[in-house]
Amino acid sequence: MITIYWVGDSTVQHNGILTYPQTGIGQGLERFINKQNVRIENHAKNGRSTKSFLEEGRFAPVCQRMQPGDFLFIQFGHNDQKQEDPARYAPADTVYADNLRLFIRAAKQRGAKPVLITPVTRCNYRQLPPERQFAPWVAAMKQVGEATDTPVLDLTRLSEALVDDMGDEAAPQLYMTLPAGVFGNYPEGLSDKTHLQPLGALYFAALITGMLRAQGEGYAALLSEECIRWLDSGKPLPV
């Protein structure tokens, strides 16, 4: 059994009933993997950056459990950019890049395959000030990927394109933009342009499947036959 170990933040983490309908991309990818041979162990945690994730010791159990042939998905950026919080801020070209190299090195030492995934976009990314944009962290991740011969799945670019294609009226349904009086966990509603509803987790995970397949047979083998047939069909994203 191949295990995908996933380290990241709240956009990836597994959510339960107390935060429903918030859903992480890791949960979304469960729909597409070859469950006979592949399992996901989701270690992503709300609010964490590469810096705080490592300093809290959250990567240690992953290192202990990774085996040859496993995968390490590495997806951070939302919290690394928070300059106002020294516990989490990881400058793109220094601390962030160094931390990515640490994850990659640890995976390779254990015989696992690291995969870098750029952060999923915020729904309102075009309206955000420069300091809230991901560009420096995305660029740093791509540079680290090239320097270490590690695949980089550019989810930022594809998620931005999807949000643009869906438009201002439809795209918010992917995110935690909730009306009042509908969800018991959020009786007053919510206007959250970062975290995802189940549909968003599914859509963005679907984007990841296409990028995994493009990496070659060893990565495509993570996906179910049904997912491969869907990718071959050229049909729109599933709902």
Image (tube, rainbow, N blue to C red):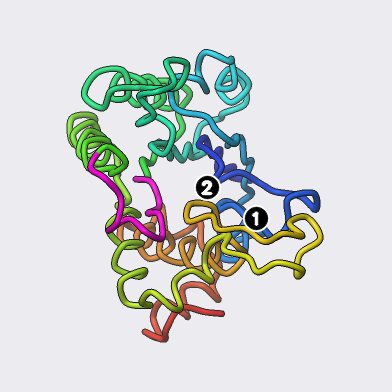
Crowding near pointer 1: few (<14 within 10 Å), some, many (20+)?
A: many
Q: Position of residue 55 (x, y in %)?
A: 52, 13
The residue that disc 1 covers is: 22
Mark 1 vs mark 2, CA separation in Å: 9 Å
Nearer-N-terminus badge (1/2): 2
Q: Is residue 139 left or right of residue 47?
A: left
Task: Name the residue at 18% across, 30% down.
Answer: 147
Determine which of the numbered discs, if any, sits on residue 11 in the image. Answer: 2
In the image: residue 195, left or right of residue 50: right
Name the residue nearer the viewer: 110 or 203.
Answer: 203
Q: Is residue 172 above or below residue 218?
A: below
Which is nearer the eye, 151 or 55? Answer: 55
**Nearer-the-camera pick, 51 or 206:** 51
Numbered badge on residue 146: none
Question: In this picture, which residue range is highlighted in magenta?
Answer: 118-130
Q: Which of the 4 image quadrants contains residue 158? A: bottom left
- The vertical placement of 118 against 103, above or below, is below
Q: Residue at x 36, y 77 (%)?
A: 167
Q: Quadrant of residue 86?
A: top left
Label count reads 2
At label 1, the amino acid type is Gln
